[in-house]
Amino acid sequence: MLVQPSSVISSSLVSSAIGYAIGLPVSKCFDSNMGMRLLIAPLIGLGIFGAAGVSVFHLLPLTAINLILTVLALFAVALWLSKGAADPLLRSPTNPGFSWLMVASLLCLLPAFAIIPQYYGESAGVGDPIWDHAKIAIINEIAQNGLPPGNPYYSEAGTPSTLIYYYVWHFIAACSSVITGASGWEADIALTGMTALFSTFVVTWLAVARSRSSNAAWWVLPLLLASSLKPIVRFVSGTWLDTWMVQDYSFEAWIIQTSWAPQHVFSGSVALIAIMAYVRILHCNAGRDLSLAAFTGAMLASAFGSSMWAGGFSPLLILPIVGVLSVSDIVRAKRLLQVLVLLSVTVAITVLCAGVLVYEQAAILHARKAVEVWIFPVFVGMGWFMDLPGFWFVLLVMDFSIMYSSFLIWTLLISSEEQERYVHIDRSLVSIVLAPLFCVQFMHSVILNNDLGWRMIIPSLLVIMVVTAALFSSQIGKSTLTGRLTTITAFVFLMPSILAGAQFVYLSDFQFRVQGPETLEGTAFSASPEMWKAVRQVTPSNEAVANNPLDFANVTYRPANISWATLSQRRNCATTLRLLRSYAAQLTPDQASEVYNFFVDAFRGEATEGQLRVMKEKYLCKTLVVTARDGLWNKPVLHNSPVYQLVSEKKGEWRIYR
């Protein structure tokens, strides 16, 4: 089998244990209700552990013993700093029941299913999101070689090999791999599922606490599937939508974000918890503030270390806005000096935990520009002045459908009601929604895709889910204007939004095992663990292999050698073009294309002895893997080559040279 269910389960349990051990003592600062504390504790704990653990394991070897001792030490610190009474941010009168927990757990398996191999006859296939999980190579790199991680996607003699990427989420997955012995793929599946569940827990906590109704928890669940209305409109109207609305740029729903990029959803969820901690520091004059300030700093560092966009840019915009909106309350309470001291502690801990990550990631700025100014394109053939209102009144309505409409209704509700108890929280929630959206309307990232636009809005997405669930639980069926608007919104948008999300789930999670087809490439993919086991037997974990960047290209959404990324547990000296452009920070786009073409041509069968030498000496490809699907198979250049000698083979299928 490509993955073992027992390893996935054990990895999930390890991540949960780490989260609860560190997070449960700290959770008392957020809610007085133990049921609600159990929901948010694991994300708090993993948020504290992520960046703190990265800092520790830049100094210590990443072994199971060191990991267990570090977790125990962080648990002891969290317990000691959190002992005694605490005035929580919220006092929830109720919490979701056991039946809700079971349904939520089943729904949150769907993002994990999207990256589990599917079988049809003798063939194995994977859903489209697996393409973005080629980062499994990062998990294997950290688990086997420690921190800082080497670059598993590219190597070149005479250049630094450190990976330039936000890898805290992958570090957490690697920790479960080190403890359980699971492969990187199995650890990735496990943490993807747990990220989905913990993110749902955080949204549910805020929705139930804000509405003071456990019914809000049940409304969260259908919103997990709520997706863009564009597929439904296209189904009804054909190509009509694409004649006037830009196709290439849009926002993705929670189910899509979590399946494709769980590290960003984890980051956005941790950032949301950290912002709530920040709100408590600003508005609650209570004990344990100094401890909470330190924990908030660690969580902000983890949020940034898991996503430059969701946990870096978003909080950088949101926190100052929330702070400015709170100044009058702080001055009135005569707490200005106290708040400044606490925020200084938060900043110091953030810098201490994230400093090494910032230093590593800043290296990309020497080679390439990261962001540019733009106006988010909405309409085809119309001026930018039409895109400005179109962003807020067309694009967001289309992509966030029921949740964006509900957010607008909710803002009307809170502006018309006296809610003194929640005014500081409500102001913060509005800021979390609007600040990232304003930013992505006028900025985009240019490293490869518009990751800034896709990922920076994740905190906004989580909060509009919160307010939608809270609104529905309190307003549906009421005869007031707000109640009628809420009921109409749910009636019009809910079912189409869920159908769009369900379509994505089917295509990603189940289509291959239902429809196939059974192919030679799929059969070879199913059998590839044997080849990679042989590669590992002759290749040390800190060396790179060369194999065809386009092997199994048709298995994935975009061309990529997913077999190497998920199964090899070894570095690759040059991968596909998109991965090179993303992770080979020292290369310009043109240089990345040259490297990619060099390896594609070589495996097509055009390699000379001189090129093989360049492959081994310049690109540090100590091992060469050739399969019967490659044009290089049986070429004379490899017969009695002075550069590479045959060390292992399976007749008619693959050969390994060193």
Image (cartoon, helix red, strand yellow):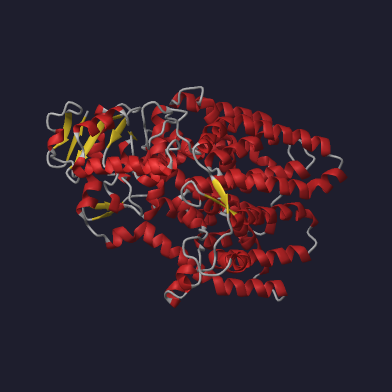
Name the residue located 72 percent from the left edge and 66 percent from the top edge: 412
- Residue 442: image quadrant is bottom right
Foreground pick, 572 / 271: 572
Foreground pick, 247 / 436: 247
Pinpoint residue 644: horizontal percent, then vertical percent. Answer: 20, 29
Task: Check the image and report above or below for 508 versus 162.
Answer: below
Foreground pick, 376 / 250: 376
Name the residue located 21 percent from the left edge and 38 percent from the top edge: 607
Pinpoint residue 203: horizontal percent, then vertical percent. Answer: 59, 53
Foreground pick, 592 / 453: 592
Pinpoint residue 195: horizontal percent, then vertical percent. Answer: 50, 46
Q: Quadrant of the C terminus?
A: top left
Task: Check the image and report above or below for 57 versus 562.
Answer: above
- Would residue 240 appear left or right of 56 to someone viewing this image? left
- Residue 239: image quadrant is bottom left
Pinpoint residue 137: horizontal percent, then vertical percent. Answer: 38, 38
Query: Is residue 474 in view from this perspective?
Result: no
- Would residue 571 appear left or right of 84 to someone viewing this image? left
Task: Check the image and report above or below for 447 versus 466.
Answer: above
Q: Quadrant of the N terminus?
A: top left
Query: Is residue 643 in view from this perspective?
Result: yes
Task: Check the image and report above or below for 405 versus 455.
Answer: below
Name the residue located 30 percent from the left edge and 43 percent from the top edge: 597
Q: Number of callouts in the render?
A: 0
- Would residue 55 appear left or right of 616 to someone viewing this image? right
Name the residue located 33 percent from the left edge and 34 percent from the top edge: 573
- Would residue 586 appear left or right of 609 to someone viewing this image? right
